Image (tube, grey):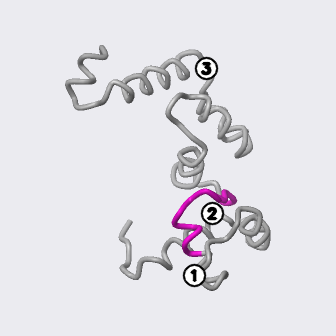
Amino acid sequence: MQAAELAACGLSRRKVEYLADLAGHFASGRVDPGRWADLGDEAVIAQLTDVRGIGRWTAEMFLIFNLLRPDVLPVDDLGLQKAVALHYCQGERPQRDDLLRLAERWRPWRSVATWYLWRSLDPLPVEY
């Protein structure tokens, strides 16, 4: 598909560039989903964040929700920070180092702890 066709679908020029870069990473093998099962979280994050437009938070969400990795701690996630502030820090948003220290006791299930903390902010049940 050409850039003009993608733009006609409503994608911005920047998103078209990101998609082209992502496709190039797949085509060249720099992003190789076939190897992800054998790679650690940081190695997968490195592959993904090498793609323009994919940052660490996006890669961490991919690890949690797509690859179902159990021990991902997205410390820059605002929802996680808000929940930790509410439940552990008397409403004060934790500093990064404090959040990392606190989450050590959640290993090797930090993704699960994160999910429960997110859910604690929303009283409505979610249907999957």
Q: Give me the C-alpha separation between circle 1 and circle 2.
A: 18 Å
Residue at image location 50% in from the left, 79% down from the top: 120
The image quadrant of residue 42 is top right
**Residue in front for this viewpoint, 89 or 122:** 89
The earlier-in-sequence mark between 3 and 1 is 3
Residue 25, numbered label: none
The answer to whether 41 is drawn above or below residue 3 in the figure is below
Disc 1 designates what residue? 86
The amino acid marked with disc number 2 is Ser
Disc 3 designates what residue? 29
Of the residues tagged 3 and 1, which is closer to the observer?
A: 1
View extreme (front): residue = 92
Please provide percent x and percent y for residue 51: 56, 28
Q: Give me the C-alpha separation between circle 3 and circle 1.
A: 43 Å
- Please identify the quadrant where the C terminus is shown: bottom left
Magenta-highlighted residues: 70-83
Please provide percent x and percent y for residue 105: 78, 73
Residue 111, numbered label: 2
The earlier-in-sequence mark between 1 and 2 is 1
- Residue 81 is covered by the magenta coloring: yes
Please provide percent x and percent y for residue 126: 38, 72
The image quadrant of residue 5 is top left
Secondary structure beneath dot 3 equals loop
The amino acid marked with disc number 3 is Gly
Residue at image location 52% in from the left, 54% down from the top: 65
